[in-house]
Amino acid sequence: MTSTIYFHGGAGAVTGSNFLLDTGEAKFLVDCGLTQGRHSAEAQNWEAFPYDVASVPFLFVTHAHIDHIGRIPKLVKDGFKGRIISTEATRALAEPLLLDSMELLAHDARKHEREPLYNEHDIEHTMRLWEGVPYHKKIELPGGVSAEFLDAGHILGSAMVRLSRGGKSVVFTGDLGGGNSPLLAPHEPLPHPDYLVMESVYGNRVRPEDKNRREELENVVEEAVARGGTLLIPAFSTERTQDLLFEIRNLMVERRVPQVPVYLDSPLATKITAAYLANPGYFAEAFRERVKGGENIFAFPELKFVEDAEESKHVAGKPGPKIIIAGSGMSSGGRVHAHEKVLLPDPRSTLLIVGYQAAGSLGRRLLEGDKNILMQGQRVQVKAKVEAIYGYSAHMDGEQLLEFVNQGRDALKQVFVVMGEPASASFLVQRIRDYLSVKATAPLAGEQAEIDL
């Protein structure tokens, strides 16, 4: 039996994950995400899908990051009527993330004189088609295909999707966690598939030892407070913010850092944090019972939630040392922009980057040392100290990715390396070939591959 994998997005690029498996008897989509870069309204997000959306009866979603779910309402708007399937936690996180994305996309669409990508009605319709299932539940599908979700350890509810038929299988990894989150269990081992479609965000990089992450955060906080400035952390609303709140809470409870005000200035992050607490079954075992028992593992006296936009305008100007956590994680929009315009010119302030920064994003330019940036038509001089802590990455690094493939090397016929910048993907491909003697390629968007499934 022969099936075809079509690489429609997330191939040759980090974002825009969108893969189609056609067995000849049925079609299965895996992910349908936004392409992200310099701004959220990349023109290709508005392009028609390169397949008949009405002919696809199933969409499997690996996790709730917007580069994996952000075009699903457009898919539904364009005629998809099938089942959308993910873990329960991914479904719970998806709705607030899609509503937030809708507003950002609408703003950018007006600026670029485009029609909105989708509206609230499209999201409502999407959620009616969406169902949540637990890890390891076998889902029987047409044409003798079965599906199963395995824990990817990336964010709450993140999953690898294994599609099987006739004793053979292909695994789509989504994004793979490197075991860095204090809140989540590590990823499950690779279950010896015949084919693997895997991420490569950090395929050509090895991160520093993550065990010093908490100490690095402690040092950054102490130094920022000692200089009398503000510590500004652009953070992704999902996973990164929750990890930071948990770590800062512990540092303050243990009196390892000064008890300064901590402002969470992200309505979306507030909603996502609530969704985390509402899905305790997806936490690591050490926290599962604590959360089920009603403990809020993110709350502490110094934490203040910034609710409305008017209040947000005054946070950066509040006197004295403080910590502000605000979206977005790549400084590509959201409330963090207003804080950056105030704080980046201040040499007492510190900008702490704790997540992946896409090529071309403002966060990437700041990380690379740009001292004169253009923000919303205004030139901003960067005099603040810019720090980075890589131990909070939710992705495997190059060594971990290679070891992950090694777990299934005896069964693997081919590895397709996707969801990475070209240099990262091609580097990982070469290492898989050289070190593991497994056939590996890095397909580009629009390419296809036949597999024995």
Image (cartoon, grey):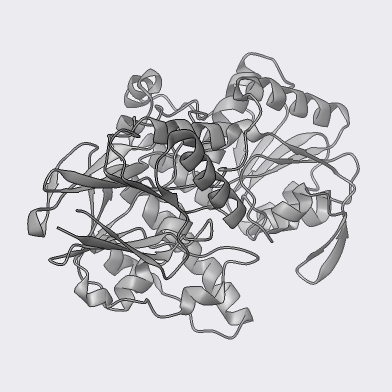
Question: Which residue is nearer to you in this view: 167 or 382?
Answer: 167
Question: Which residue is nearer to you in this view: 150 or 282?
Answer: 150
Q: Quadrant of residue 50?
A: bottom left
Q: Quadrant of residue 175?
A: top left
Question: Which residue is nearer to you in this view: 232 or 76?
Answer: 76
296 versus 231 height, above or below: above
Residue that lies at the very extreme toward the top in this rendered image: 254
410 versus 199 height, above or below: above
Q: Position of residue 109 (x, y in %)?
A: 56, 78
| Residue at 27% from the left image edge and 35% from the top image edge | 192
The answer to whether residue 48 shows anywhere in this view is yes
Q: Quadrant of residue 4?
A: bottom left
Q: Position of residue 121 (x, y in %)?
A: 34, 73
431 versus 296 height, above or below: below
| Residue at 62% from the left image edge and 39% from the top image edge | 205
| Residue at 35% from the left image edge and 34% from the top image edge | 409
Residue 143 placement, left or right of 361: left
399 versus 52 height, above or below: above
Q: Position of residue 282 (x, y in %)?
A: 33, 33
Q: Position of residue 104 (x, y in %)?
A: 55, 67
| Residue at 35% from the left image edge and 24% from the top image edge | 288
